[in-house]
Amino acid sequence: MKINKILLLLFCAGFSSVFILSGCSMFSRPKKIAVKIPKKFKYAVKAENIPVKNDWWKNFRDKQLDILVDEAVKNNLNYLIAVKNIQVAETYVSQNESNLFPVVNFSFSATRNKLPGYETSIFSGNGSSGAPSTVIYNLNQAGLNASYELDVWNQVSNAVKQARVNAAVSKEDACVVKLTLISNVAQAYFQISALEKSADNLKKQYTAEKKILNLNVIQYKDGLIDAEPVEAAKTNLEILKTELNDSIKLQDITKNTLAYYLGKFPEKFKFNANPKTRDIKGYNDINYSKLIPPNIPSEILIQRPDVKEAEYNVLSYAYAKKESLANFFPVFSLTGNYGYASPGLNNFITDTNSVWNFGLDILAPIFNYKTNISIYKRSKLQYQQAVLNYRNAIINAFSETDSALAAYKRDYRILKSYKNNFNYSKKLFHIYKIQYKAGISSQITYLTYKLNMLNAEYNLINQNLLLQENVIGVYNALGMGLKNN
């Protein structure tokens, strides 16, 4: 008896100490993870102090692009699936909330039973008694039972909070899908425009190079030049032909990809880029400094959907850890039954036929200790993993933003060089065009400078495309595009 009392006291002491140490943890809100972030980005960009729209694709002032983005958000299946995931996650909230209320059930049954008995003169009809017979009787039963698990350790409440946080995780995941979708649509749109312009340019280069080849062949046959210029022109033609085929191939692939973003079959999708975006003059008129947001605060990255998603995951696993901690404590459950039982329906609900009972069950999880400790250890590891993922998401956000800004700065400088080169070659072409018409320069010289100008234009087209992609990369890295659209 003394040993049993000592064991009981030890158990009570251990239970009390665990409750004191962990009780507050189960009822308190998880602490927010503090992460120190740099105040400024590594690569500062000089931008004009002009407000940039958060729905950034409208900064390009291209109505065709605006229509494509709206259509993609409405019809893209990946984004619609992500939205459905939000609705699915919200059902788990209501499901867990139902555990805060008692479970009530009503039942009714009617049974017919046979029991061995003895025949009497009343039932036999022949006045004999004591002969074995069968007694048949009916039993009607109705009952109302209820059970309720007391949320003493806040386990159910923590499960509800975790479900709500998981719904928030799904919302942020949908935002990530939306931002990626908008960026992909804009990039595909500008790629198609640039590829169409490049194809037009390559066709002009091919025509000029073919004229040069024909002129060289004539001079070679007349013995004025050797075979080297002829072979060089043939090589250039093959290179241009390959580049033109690649450009057309990439157009088809990118259009098919754009159709996919819009939730359409490629067979039913027709698209032609806006003529303004294909005009080289339009490229020269783009002021990229107006497209970059001025005075970007580093705190903006905390609002990126992938960063917020990682933060919500930390909260989710924190609540899961609290739930697993509650497994070490007894479960208090209240149960009650009330009903009627009678062989006849005419007096079924009389007080004499009523039956009831209630009870309090306390289940001590002593025998599940090994399972519970494994669940708790796993929840702690998952929480620590979520914290690391959160910090990694913040560092990745800074890395992507700094890389996008660095790429923009360098490519913007290169763009200026390409613009100058194009303007110089354009001026030289016009000079030699006048000289050719005046009979001062040869046709080959005129065509050569035309090729130089077309090649400079080709480089400018592709560099503008690269810079447009850089600007989109900056917007995407900053997490812009979720408000006011």
Image (cartoon, grey):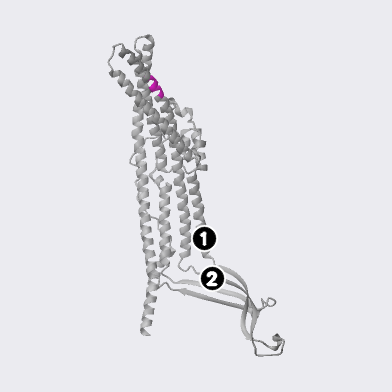
Q: Which mark is residue 268?
A: none
Region of the chain picked out in magenta, as a range: 203-208
Q: Is residue 480 visible?
A: no
Q: Point out residue 8 in the picture as x, y percentages from the top left corner.
A: 39, 79
Q: Is residue 483 visible?
A: yes
Question: Gap between marks 1 and 2, in whole Å?
Answer: 17 Å
Q: In which quadrant will I find the N terminus?
A: bottom left
Q: Secondary structure at mark 2?
A: strand
Left or right of 169, for residue 139: right
Q: Amino acid at mark 2?
A: Ser
Q: Point out residue 80 in the picture as x, y percentages from the top left corner.
A: 50, 46
Magenta span: chief secondary structure: helix
Q: Which mark is residue 95?
A: 1
Q: Amino acid at mark 1?
A: Gln
Residue 370: in magenta span: no
- Residue that carries the numbered disc 2 in the rendered image: 147
Residue at (42, 40) in percent of width and height: 475
Graded by Cα atoms within 10 Å as few (under 14), some (14 to 19) or many (20 or more), the crowding at tag 2 reads: some
